[in-house]
Image: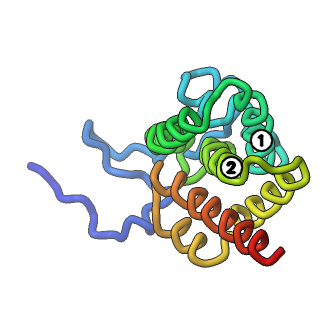
Amino acid sequence: MQTDPPLVPADDLVGHSQPNASGPRAPRPQPRRATARFMLSHPLHILSLGFGSGLSPVAPGTIGTLFAWASFAVLSRYLTVIEWGALIVAGFFGGIAICGFTAKKLGTDDPSPVVWDEIIAFWLVLLMVTPVTLTGQFVAFIVFRFFDMVKPPPIGYFDRRLKGGFGIMFDDLVAAFFTLLVIALWRMSV
């Protein structure tokens, strides 16, 4: 005899046992902590955790963005604008799967150690503002971090509503758009 699952909202089941297809209820997995061991357990974790930059105990998003800035400076010696564009597009669409995979393994919707989204979005910002001085790059960094951390509308809306790998990647893409808009308006006013 088959029994139906209880008619309880999913939110009421948080922290309680969940039905399991193999039999009795199994406890819901608790979120995992991202560690170096976790990162090295799968190649996709290495990418999503920004080659370890997301493991910073303080401001992993900022550290991930700094990694993006440094890697952009190094890779720009070897990549053309077209190659950068292809890398960013591939990194965005690949990032949907990569970030979603790592988030699922960590047991949370948008884990702060996942910084691939910041890397791709800030690469886009730097590509679009180049050529620019080091001071100009620093201003782009500050403006991007503002939009990514504060998440003013509509960024916060997308951050709350969109889940999974797409949600992780998309709100940073919107933050990059607003960063570029602010920089463009500032350049027009000067």
The secondary structure type at the circle numbered 2 is helix
Q: Residue 62: x, y in percent?
A: 79, 50
Q: Quadrant of residue 22?
A: top left
The secondary structure type at the circle numbered 1 is helix
Q: Report whether 34 appears left or right of 42.
A: right
Q: Does residue 146 sit above or below 45 in this rendering?
A: below
Looking at the rendered structure, which numbered label has been put on residue 122?
Answer: 2
Q: Does residue 161 sit above or below 134 in this rendering?
A: below
User: Is residue 105 in view from this perspective?
Assistant: no
- The residue labelled by disc 1 is 69
Q: Residue 34: x, y in percent?
A: 67, 36
Farthest right residue in view: 135
Looking at the rendered structure, which numbered label has been put on residue 35?
Answer: none
**Identity, as a three-letter code, of the amino acid under mark 2:** Phe
Q: Residue 78: x, y in percent?
A: 68, 24
Q: CA distance from mark 2 to mark 1?
A: 7 Å
Residue at 51 percent of width and 68 percent of height: 158
**Identity, as a three-letter code, of the amino acid under mark 1:** Trp
Q: Report whether 115 appears left or right of 165.
A: right
Q: Earlier in the sequence, mark 2 or mark 1?
A: 1
Residue at 38 percent of width and 51 percent of height: 18
Q: Residue 151: x, y in percent?
A: 67, 70
User: Is residue 70 in view from this perspective?
Assistant: yes
Residue at 82 percent of width and 43 percent of height: 57
- The local crowd at label 1, few if under 14, some if 14 to 19, many if 20 or more residues have their Cα within 10 Å, is some
Is 56 or 170 nearer to us in this picture? 170
Q: Are marks 2 and 1 in contact (CB under 8 Å)?
A: yes
- The local crowd at label 2, few if under 14, some if 14 to 19, many if 20 or more residues have their Cα within 10 Å, is many
Q: Report whether 139 appears left or right of 38.
A: right
Which quadrant of the rendered structure holds the C terminus? bottom right
Counting labels gives 2
Q: Does residue 10 sit above or below 45 in this rendering?
A: below
